Structure formats: C-alpha cells, structure tokens
Image (cartoon, rainbow, N blue to C red):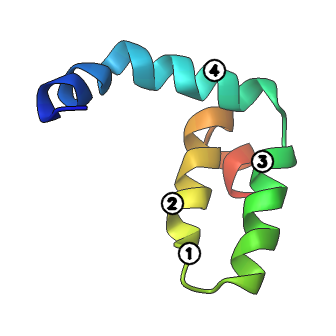
Amino acid sequence: MDIEAIKQWFTLDNALSMLEQYRSFGVFPGIAATLLESFFPVLPMFVFVMANAAAFGLWKGFL
C-alpha cells in the first residue's frame, strides 16, 4: 500500500462514515476504550474522549 492510496482513503466522507459506524455501536466502544486504557496507560485517553464527543456531541460524549 503506497502513500497516495492512504491519502485518498483519509477523506471527509470516510471520516464521517467512520463516525456513523462508531455511533451505531452506542456507548460500548467508549466504555471498552476507557477500560482498555485503565490497563494500558500508554493509550491516549484524550483521543477516546474526543471520539466520543465527535460521535455523540459534547455533553453526552464527555460523560
């Protein structure tokens, strides 16, 4: 896989479809990511919180 193929994959449409797929799972990915982060502190909690905020909105995403 070359760099151009990777650049073509990271588009706004693909990012929005990934958020829709993430949102369709409900709160389970956020809970699982937080649980995983508690065992592996190297993982960035900020990324998990921002993904939840992007998928569910600021108020529900931060809870």
How crowded pointer 3 is (Cα within 10 Å; few <14, some 14-19, many 20+) is rated as some
Categorize mark 2 by other alpha carbons within 10 Å: few (<14), some (14-19), many (20+): few
- Is the Cβ of the residue at disc 3 closer than 8 Å to that at disc 4? no
Foreground: 8 or 35? Answer: 8
Check contact, mark 1 vs mark 4: CB within 8 A: no
Which label's residue is closer to the chain start, 1 or 4? Answer: 4
At numbered mark 2, what does the secondary structure look like: helix, strand or loop?
helix
Mark drawn on residue 23: none
Q: Which residue is mark 3?
A: 29
Q: Pinpoint residue 34: horizontal percent, then vertical percent.
A: 75, 68
Relative image position of residue 3 (x, y in whole percent) = 14, 35
Q: Is residue 19 above or below residue 51?
A: above
Alpha carbon separation for disc pair 3 and 2: 12 Å
What residue is shown with label 2? 47
Q: Look at label 3 and name its amino acid.
A: Pro
Labels 3 and 2 touching (C-beta < 8 A)? no
Residue for point 48% across, 20% down: 16
Label 4 neighbourhood size at 10 Å, few (<14), some (14-19), many (20+)?
few
Nearer to us of marks 1 and 2 is 1
Rounded to the nearest angstrom, the CA distance separating label 1 from label 3 is 14 Å
The reply to whether discs 1 and 2 touch (Cβ–Cβ < 8 Å) is yes
Marks 1 and 4, how far apart at CA? 23 Å
Label 1 sits on residue: 43
Which residue is painted at 68% across and 32% down in the image?
22
Camera-nearest label, 1 or 4: 1
Looking at the rendered structure, the secondary structure element under dot 1 is loop
